[in-house]
Image: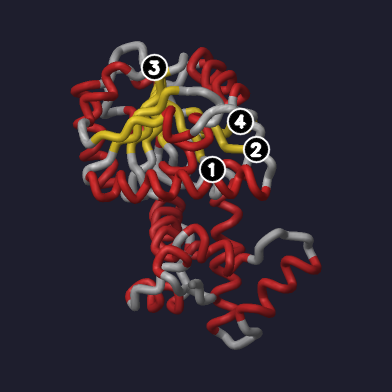
Amino acid sequence: MKKLAVIGAGVMGQGVSYQFAKFGYQVTLIDLSDEVLEDAKKKIKNIERLDKLLHKSKSTYVALDQITCTTDLSSISSADFIIENVTENIKIKETLYQEIAKYISNDALLAVNTSAVSITRLASFLPQPKNIMGIHFMNPVHLKPTVEVIRGFHTTEETINTTQTLLQSVEMEGVVVNDYPGFISNRVLMLTVNEAIFSLQDGVADAKSIDKIFKQCFGHTMGPLETADLIGLDTILYTLDVLVESYQDTKFRPAPLLKKMVDAGLHGRKSGEGFFKYN
């Protein structure tokens, strides 16, 4: 299994493509726009530079030599393994999966890179639902070697085992969880992030102080508000909305401050400002 297709050239698609390319996999990176793909190539080159400079990556491969960029979705037809990374929006994903169904081979495995969307629901659009699973990669991908592998209703043990072997080949470890909204990571993390936002909204402490407690008292690398900025406040809001709807539990109700910031275009790192400002 050496031919991979990565759908979506945003932050996660860039990270996933780089991780597999640096271990010698041939990766086809797919997006709707040539402009987006050109930007992705620049970002991947920078990820590689920093990985070698700061983290002493010993990869003998040049990432971009392993990655082919295209806007042609039909190119997935030759892929052994497909990783989908588009926006965390069920409607957008459903539309995409209807298109994927036209081209995916019966033997190919497909991983949904998602933090909240139902694997079982998306698998229903494809001809071989047994070959579909979720992989929840963390950002930045090359520095987060543990991922959630999500078992859908129809996902077979063979699919799970093949996925685990693939992840091990790029020095990653999959923790298998079942298909429930938010899985483990976001079901717990979103409560923490949301409560931190409520604390900021209520004036309990400022953003820097809230994060400082988590970093210096609990040993976290990042506090909940910096984490929210990294994920994207729009993604945080969408995920909380999914959890509220799925569990019918108001404990996931998004803080009004979060909604206000998203409406104002403050989406975190990707927009240059969230709970903190970025250059």
Q: Point out the tag, 3 or 4, that comes first from the N-terminus.
A: 4
Furthest toward the bottom, the residue is 203
The residue that label 1 is drawn on is 48
Left or right position of 4 against 104: right
Q: In this picture, is 157 found above or below 38? A: above
Q: Position of residue 218 (x, y in %)?
A: 78, 63
Cα distance between the residues tagged 4 and 1:
10 Å
Sequence-wise first label, 2 or 1 = 1
Q: Secondary structure at mark 3?
A: loop
Please state which of the two labelled residues, at mark 3 or mark 4, is closer to the viewer.
Answer: 4
Residue 264, located in which quarter of the rendered image?
bottom left
Task: Locate residue 163, reporting x and y percent.
Answer: 52, 22
What secondary structure is marked by label 4?
loop
Q: CA distance from mark 3 to mark 4?
A: 23 Å
Which residue shows up at 61% across the image and 45% down it? 51
Judged from the image, the secondary structure of the residue bearing numbered disc 1 is helix
Q: Which is more toward the observer, 276 or 99? A: 276
Kindly check if marks 2 and 4 are in contact, taking CB atoms under 8 A apart as contact.
yes
Give the CA separation, mark 1 to mark 3: 25 Å
Residue behind mark 4: 59
Task: Name the element at disc 2.
Answer: loop
* Dot 2 alpha-carbon crowd within 10 angstroms: few under 14, some 14 to 19, many 20 or more: some
In the rendered view, would you say 143 is above or below 223?
above
**Mark 2 sits on what residue?**
57
> Which residue is found at the position 33% from the left and 41% from the top?
8
Which of marks 1 and 4 precedes in the sequence? 1
Q: Which label number is shown at residue 80?
A: 3
**Dot 1 and dot 3 residues touching (CB under 8 Å):** no
